[in-house]
Image (cartoon, rainbow, N blue to C red):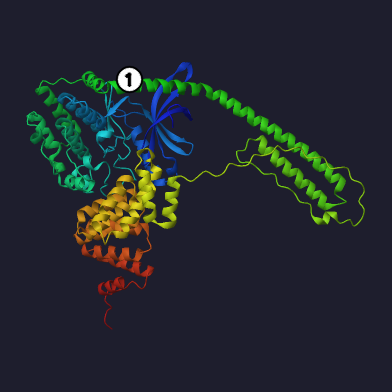
Amino acid sequence: MAANQPKSFGKYILLDQMAVGGMAELYRAMITGVQGFEKLIAIKKILPHLASEEELISSFIDEAKLAALLHHQNIVQIYDFGSLDNSYFIAMEYLFGKNLRLITQKSVEKNLPLPLADALFIVSRICSGLDYAHTLKDFQGKPLNIIHRDISPPNILVTYEGSVKIVDFGIAKAANQTTMTQLGMVKGKVAYMSPEQAAGKIIDNRSDIFSCGILLYELVTGKRMFEGETLHILSHVRDCVFVAAESIDDQLPQQLIEILHKALAKDPADRYATCSEMEADLEECMYANAMRPTAHGLSDYLKKLFADEITAEETLIKELTELGATASAAEPTQQKKEKKWQNKVKKSYEHLAESGKKQLDSIKTQNEKKNPVLLYGGIAATVVVLIALFAIFSGDDKPVEPQQVVQSPAAETNVAEPAPAAPEPEPAPVEAVPEPPPPAEPTKLVIAVQTLKEKGFELALPLFEEIWANENERSADVALPYSQALTEKATAIVESEPQVAEKILTLASEINPDNVAAFEQLGRLYMMMDDYPMAVVFYNQATNLAPDHPGPFFALGYIYGINREYAKAEEMYNQVVELEPEYLDDALFNLAAIQLQQGKKDTCIENLKKALSINPENSSAQKLLEKLTPKSGG
């Protein structure tokens, strides 16, 4: 949306679009009320083309429910949640400031490093907000055990007044939510994950603590903790391989080094147990080193760092809110105009209908006993006129071509000379309807999508690459089919050229982080290379994105089985059985084999029988069942 085109959205006015992600779009908006009341807010709404995705909508609703419970000065506040124009939305606090990613980039650009005291202050505020979320209880007093899962620079915003806010609890989960799988879920940005999160294991609040440690490391050293391509970063995170902070800056206080070591311990048991413990150590470190950071001091630093941007943003917001207020004031007038027009159309239609009825009665009186063909021809002609007039009067965007009723030759055959009939009333003149405009030329994206559908990825990929090369044209509408085309290409060469396929699949998953097929193929690729830990990571990502897709669960069952992790393998195969795929008999056989390894003979036999009831020709199930239930001798 252009900045000068505010748009009504229920009780809100959308001012301009600030960002677009793979799932939702973020708008700067305002709400107005009586006596000139105005409030600037932010609205996050599901992308229109995803409105029918039930799993995604469920996740969005979970986010809203969870975020509504959070009321803390270091967490963005949620005001409203609902559905308008077939799109779910969340209305939240508008934060006039910058995220940590932009702050660190600008500090390098202007050669104004973030003061050490401010870095410690920021992370201590993050710890405060997280500790609140981690320890929050529901209305019955039961701990929710919320984990953010994506503590990273873009999700930490510092306002120009020095407030620190955690944003986007979009992938956070409460432990008792039914949408949460029992598997570890690889979510969030790879370079800010904990080792256990990167390995696809079950995580707890200490995963967020590790992510806080990464932020602290990067703020105080000015260096990225994990760098490189996505897959290399994932490997380093999983193994917790990074350069120690003291090796980068030997002037760091000893207390700070100890905090970093504890927060960044590979084993969660060696980390801080709670964020409040880490917060306390940060405050003690600041006190011991005569640091007295404040929100006011942090505000001064940001205003110096973003002086030009702040002025421009203030001007933009002033202009947008003025336009928004004008649009809001005009809304009742516009509604009255629309209602008046609707009433006018209704009355005109009623008048035409009454006039048409009188014409039909007149025609019927004169002709019903003399010429049936003329009767029905006249009725049809009158109805066509009414339809044409109504289409013009109602302002229908689609032109209606009046149909012509051709009189049948039978009407000219006179069996008997009819008595002179009253002349038919002339139909009301119909204004000429303009010819519809010629169809618009298909866009590059439309051509690329059609090419992918009809001729395959080989011809479509160059088209998508050309579109993607223009950053202004990058959007979810391009990302989804482009990622699909890349995945199809990689799938075709995954066995013959695995290294090339790996790079293509990585690109596909980066362009569309919700591409289930790309993660599934990466899992398959690493299985082929016998790199089972990496295969587990990507199969887990696929199960998280598509919990109703049995393939990745089946692959995980196999991996856990050959690695003698029988309990996990049984869990995976049980999940496959619940989903009832076409190969249900094979899933039941594998489940039975894993149960036999655990000494669950009776359950094993029961599942073998189920497999054979589905497919009596499953020889593997038949042989194992015969082995376990030998026929007694006569």
Q: Badge 1 is on which residue?
A: 311
Q: Is residue 362 above or below residue 414?
A: above
Using the image as rendered, state which of residue 333 and residue 547 is in the foreground.
Answer: 333
Q: In which quarter of the image is the N terminus?
A: top left
Q: Is residue 452 left or right of residue 388?
A: left
Residue 338 placement: quadrant: top right
Question: Residue 32, how many percent across, how many down?
Answer: 46, 22
Using the image as rendered, state which of residue 70 and residue 600 is in the foreground.
Answer: 70
Q: Is residue 171 left or right of residue 216?
A: right
What residue is at 72 percent from the left and 44 percent from the top? Answer: 384
What residue is at 49 percent from the left and 23 percent from the top? Answer: 328
Residue 570 is at least partly visible in this image: no
Question: Residue 14, how many percent across, how many down?
Answer: 44, 29
Question: Residue 203, how many percent across, how many down?
Answer: 23, 44
Residue 329 is at least partly visible in this image: yes
Q: What element carries label 1?
A: helix
Question: Residue 198, how many percent across, how many down?
Answer: 22, 46
What residue is at 35 percent from the left and 23 percent from the top? Answer: 313
Residue 290 placement: quadrant: top left
Q: Is residue 34 above or below residue 91?
A: above
The kind of residue tagged 1 is: Thr
Residue 30 placement: quadrant: top left
